Image (tube, coloured by chain):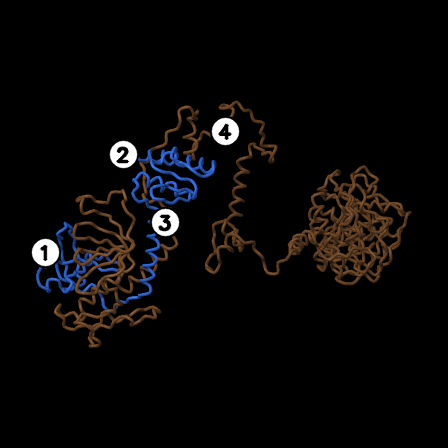
Amino acid sequence: MEGQVGGSGEEFAVGCLLSIKTTLGDEFDGQVMAFDRFTNMLVIQEGLKSGPRRNIRLLNANYIKDFSFLGQADDPLDPKKCFLDLSRLQAREHLAVRQAEADAQRIGVGVTTEAQNIFDALSKTLPVRWDKTVIVVMNEVRVSSPYLPESVSGGTAAANERVKKVLEFERKRLQARGSSQG
Amino acid sequence: MMNLQQVMPPKSTANGFGRRRGEREGGTRLESKSQSGKSNSGRVTTTVIGSKSGSCAVSSHDKLLYLASCLIGLSVEVQVKGGSVYAGIFHATSDEKDFGVILKMARLIKDGNFRGQKTVAEFVSKPPSKNFIIPSSELVQVIAKDVAVTRDGFANELQSDKQRELMIDSLISQTRHVEERELEPWIPDEDVPQLPELENIFDDPWNSKKWDQFETNETLFGVKTTFNEELYTTKLLRGPQTEELEKEAARIAREIAGEDTQDLHLAEERGSSIHENLGIDEETRFSSVYRGTGFDDSGYEEDEDIVLNTHNNETFGDSSGSVDQISTDFAIAKSSDGGQLSSSSFIVDEAQTSQSDGTGADLYCSEIPSRNFSTLDSESRVQENLLGECGGNNDAKDFVEKQPLPEDAQLPKSGDSQSSPNREKAGTIKVGRSANATPYSTSHVLSKGNEKTSSHGEPVDVAASCKAPGEPQSVNSRGRPGSSASSNSDRAAATSASSGPGLSPSSSMGSLSSEKSTLNPYAKEFKLNPNAKSFTPSQASARPLSPVADNAFYHPPNVSAVPHMHGLPVGFGMGPSLAAQQPVIYPQIAPMQSPQTYYHPHGPQYGQQMLVGQSRPVFYLPNYQPEMPYKGRDY
């Protein structure tokens, strides 16, 4: 839905303290850091304080349903202190991506929460990975849905046994925990 | 969609440089702090002054770009038109008229279709998107947390990044859901026998009901103990005076504990930390062994010396302190039993005299060991040391006479009268050594004695007296007076009593020690007189101290070579091998409690069990090779 851009540019002067409601139901307060009328993007710093780290929102002003003016303060962004270290940014990004990929490995796609829990529990002590919806332990033992001790197959007898045991234990633990929470 | 360009920090002054397209167009001048080689690879932009947005000197677009750049690499959430929210890593934004966003590894976390749902169903339906593009038409907002936008923030971020790096392992192994469970108090099993007193006893430190483990054990399991504390420790005398004694003991303890000390570790224990000097690292403070300056293994000697010397001094009077090392050991032996020492020293002397090599000390020492295993049982080791020490003190003693040490005790040449009592003992005592006694390190003790008497000249006399076989007696006589003259007449007497030719150890030692380097030039060679009368100490002169009981003699096993035996202030003993030729004159001092005079018929040949004529058990030293040069204490 395209809302009307609220007010003229002055209303979004840098430093304004505003309370905003979006068309999607978000409400928040913040201070204007920047407003680009050409893209209609409003950059708001959440909270009324400025510190080394801030929560920032880039909001498309079209989606502002309502706002109110809380006050006027100085520019929260001190131009003298603004630098960009591109390489650092890129490094940060690479790192984040790597981590995300690793994380992603651990999440089974199309598996139930329970399965994911089991996977997580197993991963504490055994090397596990997902193969579609099958948990592969130590690259040899496979645990498929519904992830019961009976569903364990493959691998050497010893490995199999071990996985079964661990699986049972973890299931019990999860159940106990679940029931206590439930 | 444009890739993000390098953004230049907003500048307050405009300067029209390269306009590319429109006022706000263009790449931005890169200002990267780092070594990016790509500086300025981006398009240069202009800063627009007086843009419509008002007075800000920096174009708002620039600011937007800048802030967007700050998000690169951060995990952000992007809300799209439908209400769905995606989380991913901010990768790029467009720099066109529209503001679109590219995320990496994005996943849906909130599905707009299921309004009201806080978090996405945990059922993950598809893997994260490697690159997820959100066009401007879809974009509602981008939410990022903890963004560093200024220099301070960057520093801050770097720091926490580093911290986070270190945590990677734990992060990785963490489960995705941190589930906590409700804690419940522990309830013990029903079938475990519970001791009702347990709670009281252990919880309350002031509980008057004392916990008796044995009692409990017996009650619970029927196990009867045979533990008797007194088997393992001294029996405590508890009587009417117990409390008094305890108080006294506590007082003394407090005193000691409250003492000042320079030792770091002690200070630590006592709680009086002297850590003004912050340069002291933890290892020094709590762990390492203190090594004083000049510390070395022979430090033991020094300490011993000090201790012993004082003892020596007490017992025998100060003699020249020349002999330090050996004296230590000897001193030890000595201190433990003054009287004993005298005999020891005596023996040392003998040893010395017997030694024929140039190093008197060596000889001395070597002699001693086998012989002088005095009754100082406890001190046997000490004696050993002393003897060992003996060897070390070569400087002192180049014995003029290098006669083989006869079995008899040789009177240390210490001129001190103290020695005389020792000399008494031996018909066969070789007195000649006495003169040389002083130089013996082992004769530290003796020297100590000598010191007091300060009669370096005396040794000569003694030596002389020692010379003749018959002399011992005379020596004795001389010694007697001498000894009495010395401060430790008592001891001397005792010594003499026990040790035969009244060579008090101290005296002999003293003389030895006092004379650092030269043998007694006047000392005559000692020749064993087989017919010499044996010394019989008078009953009265029995030494007061005889720590070693009659049967407490040391019986060293037959060892082939005991180099460190040099310094042994053997109380008495006879090298078994000594018996070979000359009649060994066993001290026939029945009541003698201290080590008896040692007659060494041969040279220092210790090794076999020595048979003393008496019923006393006899010391015998392991085979000692007298010729072995003693190189200092080694133990």
- Residues at discs 3 and 2 both on one chain: no
Which chain, by letter, is blue? A
Image position, residue A31 (x, y; %) = 17, 59
Q: Nearer the viewer, mark 4 or mark 2?
A: 2
Q: Nearer the viewer, mark 2 or mark 1?
A: 1
- Identify the image quadrant of residue B159: bottom left
Q: In which quadrant of the rendered image does the N terminus of chain B lie? A: bottom left
* Chain containing the residue with disc 2: A
| Count of residue discs | 4
Q: Name the colour assigned to chain B in the rendering.
A: brown
Identify residue for label 1: A3
Q: Are marks 2 and 1 in contact (CB under 8 Å)?
A: no
| Label whose residue precedes the other's in the sequence (3 or 4) | 3
The disc placed on residue B212 is: 4
What is the CA distance from the residue labelled 4 to the residue labelled 1?
84 Å
Q: Residue at x 49, y 23 (%)?
A: B219
The residue carrying pointer 2 sits among few (fewer than 14), some (14 to 19) or many (20 or more) residues within 10 Å by Cα, namely few
What is the CA distance from the residue labelled 2 to the residue labelled 1?
43 Å
